[in-house]
Image (cartoon, rainbow, N blue to C red):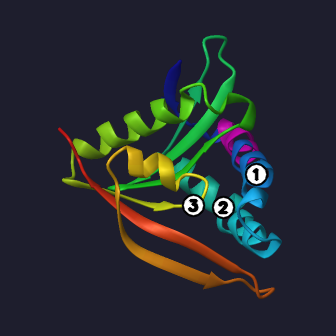
Amino acid sequence: MSIRPAQASDFETVREITRTTITAVYPHYYPAGAVAFFLAHHSDENIAADISAGRVCLVSDDAQHTAGTVTIKDNEICRLFVLPQYQGKGFGRELLDFAEAEIAKKYAEIILDASLPAKSIYLKRGYRETEYHIIKTPDGDHLCYDVMKKEAVK
């Protein structure tokens, strides 16, 4: 397993990981309007801007197949997605370990927005819920998520 910064040439890979994971996993937890909201939130423009700013990293298996991505914005972990075929094999844990270590170099606290599929993972890793949000989507569905925080370990 290896983690590296994403380059502009990785845009399609980050986009595909994000879209594939959302469309495969999120419909099991959220109504269609919320899934559409997630897809719009992780737009091409947002992905490209984050790559350009040097905020995006990719994890690959030993054969150099890209399995997942994470975005780190200051002390916030964003857009952590692992392709469905790689889930349960340690890639998400590796990305999360990496992001937490990077944030701990500069900040005392780590923040993230936890979707329903990932919330239990974050709770097991010592994150605590600090806020609960409900967003009404344009088609009338509701998207619920928690803001979670954890003390950074140096």
Tag 3: amino acid: Ser
Q: Earlier in the sequence, mark 3 or mark 2?
A: 2
Q: CA distance from mark 3 to mark 2?
A: 13 Å
Indicate whether 133 appears above or below 89. Answer: below
Helix, strand or loop under label 3: loop
Q: Is residue 40 left or right of residue 132?
A: right
Residue 116 position by quadrant: bottom right
Q: Which mark is residue 39?
A: none
The residue that label 3 is drawn on is 115
Q: Is residue 85 left or right of residue 121?
A: right
Residue at image coords 73%, 37%:
84
Tag 2: amino acid: His
Quadrant (top left, top right, bottom left, bottom right) of the C terminus: top left
What is the x, y in percent for residue 126?
A: 32, 48
Indicate whether 44 appears above or below 96. Answer: below
Q: Is residue 72 within the magenta segment?
A: no
Between 132 and 73, the one lying in front of the other is 132
Q: CA distance from mark 1 to mark 3?
A: 15 Å
Between 29 and 90, the one lying in front of the other is 29
Q: Is residue 6 left or right of residue 128?
A: right
Is there any visible trace of residue 25 in the rendered image?
Answer: yes
* Count of picture labels: 3
The residue that label 2 is drawn on is 42
What is the x, y in percent for residue 82?
A: 64, 38
Between 147 and 98, the one lying in front of the other is 147
The residue that label 1 is drawn on is 19
